[in-house]
Image (cartoon, rainbow, N blue to C red):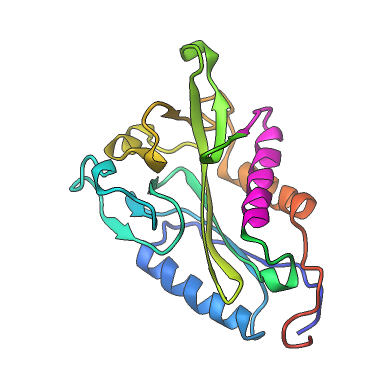
Amino acid sequence: MEGNMEPEWKITDAPVPYEEALAFMEARAEAIAAGKAPELVWLLEHPPLYTAGTSSDPADLLTPDRFPVFQTGRGGQYTYHGPGQRVAYVMLDLKRRTPDVRLFVQDLERWLIATLARFNIKGEIRDGRVGVWVQRPERGAGREDKIAAIGIRLRKWVSFHGISLNVDPELDHFSGIVPCGISQHGVTSLIDLGQLVSMADVDMALKECFADVIGPPRLASREDA
C-alpha cells in the first residue's frame, strides 16, 4: 500500500445502527493494523441511543428505558447519539503518525475547534472536561454548554470511535443522562447557537479542517515499512 496516502472518507446518509457501526469499525481497524486497508474517516448519524464509556457511572443514566443503551470500549462516560448530530469515526494508524494518546485527543479537539470557527463559533477546551465547550454568558455567569464530545479507543495503535458534533439534534434527548458526568453545564448545537447550517456544510468544514489540523500520515504504511 502506497505511503503517505490521504485517509479515505465515507459518508452514510441513513442512520446507522450502533452494533453495525461498531462491527464495521473493529473490522476496519484490524485491517488497517495489518496493512490491508487505508485509514478511514466515517461520517454518519445514529438513531437515538445512549452509549456508556469505560468511565461511566450508572447513576448518570437518568432514564434507562428512554433509548437503547450500549456499553462500549471507548474512553469517557455517557453520551447521546441521534439524528442531527454528526458523528465522525476516525480509524487512523497512530504508528504512522505520533503514537501518543494525549496528543491525539488534543488533535481531535483542535479539529473540532477549527471546524466551529468556520461558523463563527468559538469552541474551547477545559481542564478535566473532555470535549469542546461554548461560553453562554446570556444564560448566566460562568455558563458553558457542550457542543462536541470525544471518545476514542486504540487497538494495535489504530484508533476507532471518535467525535460527535451537535448540528441540530433534539437537545432534550440529552436530559436522559448526565452528559460526560457533568451536571452543572448544558448542551448546545450549531442551530441552537443561531447558525443555520446543513449537515453537508458541516461535512465540508470537517474535511477541510481535518486536512489543515491532522492531515495525512507522515510514515509509510505498515506493509511498506
Left or right for 3, reference 16 = right
* Residue under the image location 67 percent in, 41 percent down: 115
Does residue 36 appear in the picture of this structure?
A: yes
Q: Residue 58's x, y, as percent?
A: 25, 49
Q: Determine whether 89 is above or below 59 in the image.
A: below
Magenta-drawn stretch contains 191: no
Magenta-drawn stretch contains 103: yes
Please report the bounds of the magenta region as a residue range.
102-124
Q: Residue 176's x, y, as percent?
A: 27, 39
Does residue 166 appear in the picture of this structure?
A: no
Q: Residue 111's x, y, as percent?
A: 68, 47
* Residue under the image location 41 percent in, 56 percent down: 15
Q: Residue 200's x, y, as percent?
A: 61, 46
* Residue under the image location 69 percent in, 44 percent down: 110
* Residue under the image location 77 percent in, 64 percent down: 216
Q: Determine whether 137 is above or below 58 in the image.
A: above
Instruction: Identify the image quadrant of residue 159.
Output: bottom right
Q: Determine whether 127 is above or below 11 in the image.
A: above
Q: Nearer the viewer, residue 112 or 167?
A: 112
Left or right for 195, reference 19 = right
Q: Mostly what secondary structure, the magenta segment?
A: helix
